Image: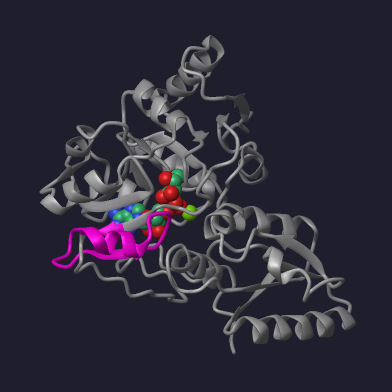
Amino acid sequence: VSQPIQTQILPVVYQPDDSSYQQAIQIASKAIQAGQLVAFPTETVYGLGANALSAEAIARIYIAKQRPTSDPVIAHIAHIDQLQQLATNIPSIAYDLAEAFWAGALTMVLKRGENVPANIATGLETVAVRFPSHPIAHDLIKASGVPIAAPSANTFTRPSATTPEHVLEDLDGRIEFILAGGSTTIGLESTVIDLTASRPRILRPGGITVDEILRVIPDADYSPQFTAKETPTSAPGQMLKHYSPRAQVILYHGERNATLEAMYQTALEQIAQGKTVGLLITQEDQARLAGIGVPYLLGGQTDLETISRNLFAGLRYLDSQNVDLILAHDFGDSGLGVALWDRLHRAAEGNIIYL
Ligand code: TXA
Ligand code: MG
């Protein structure tokens, strides 16, 4: 029987010359070296970190997250030289992508190097690598002296964590440390691209948009797949139920006025049946939906960066209000709208109304 873990919070503000900042990085990096689990901020979402070169440390990630061992984990680096430590047969387009988007919200799937434990990629012959731009993530990786394996710091299938409070909500008593460095800025996970097939394939749209990728690799493929069941051997991470709040989500897709009208009618019907209805909406939607349900305002309708930053916090907030149902709508199919659609689609588990 394993001992319960006392989760320690290390508050940090990025101040490289400050001794208490350096001390927190030291404590966290020693923990990584000792095979412990440390949640840390990145520019996308919080990561649940462990030594990426230790099979035992990686195994602990799956247990803490309650994640099936069929879903592989990303290795995070803080220097481009660490790429060769993790991967082999690196194609030149990997360097083109690194040049364009690293440090940043892009993860590349490459052929796994022989020093990297197989359980980081659930036995696949690949490894996913990302070079985050967040300075605290950067300092933690450098001080640890090893790449850091980290999935998003949420319990399996829950919305990703964009604040230290979200991490604590899901992982208190399951990990040793949280480097509590405020809210993350992008709020959606990185874009994952597989470079091991003959044609580069975007596995998950994210903080770097599909359009941005296509500018560097014009033949990259993005064909969204929302399969109902995880199949360990095919594309990992494509499972439909993902990013899910406890409440049921209904996602509306269509012309804006028709969408708001349908959301309004559904909210009225559900409230009449005694249900509590949450509304994941924009500032502009507020007037049409005034006076019904529990609103969470994501931001301005055309400000997809703010909407992305607030999405997971919004899902978690509405859960905390004990709503039975969350009504949300799409944000178009360009720019960050693609990643927003992917996350909302999964949060809704395919429960979508096309108008
Ligand atoms: O922004 C992010 O990517 C965050 C921060 C912490 O870096 N991390 C993150 O990790 O979102 P996670 O584990 O929640 O999602 C990683 C995704 C999963 O969909 C996983 O299936 C995919 O990347 N992935 C990881 N390794 C892979 C591999 N070897 N082959 C294919 N897909 C892989
Ligand atoms: Mg995740």
What residue is rendered at 65% in x and 62% in y? 245
Residue 173 location, x and y as percent?
64, 36
Task: Name which quarter of the figure residue 84 lies in.
Answer: top left
- What colouring does the structure picture have? one colour
Q: Nearer the viewer, residue 57 or 147?
A: 147
Extent of the magenta region: 193-216
Q: Is residue 257 above or below residue 304?
A: below
Left-right relation of 11 to 88:
right
197 falls in the magenta region: yes
> Is 3 colored magenta in this rendering?
no
Q: Is residue 241 left or right of residue 289?
A: left
The quadrant of the image that shows the C terminus is: bottom right
Going by the picture, which residue comes out furthest to the bottom? 355
- Looking at the image, which residue is at 50% across and 54% down? 188
Residue 223 sits above or below residue 237 on the image: below
Residue 168 at x, y percent in the picture = 65, 40
Closest to the observer, 27 or 343: 343
The residue lying toward the viewer, choosing from 13 and 31, is 13
Decide if residue 122 is in sight here. Answer: no
Q: Quadrant of the N terminus?
A: top right
Residue drawn at x 53%, y 19% as measured from the top left: 24
In the image, taking residue 355 as reference, residue 103 lies left or right, namely left
Provide residue 66's location: percent of width, then percent of height: 53, 51
**Residue at image coords 34%, 50%:** 106
Is 178 rendered above or below residue 74?
above
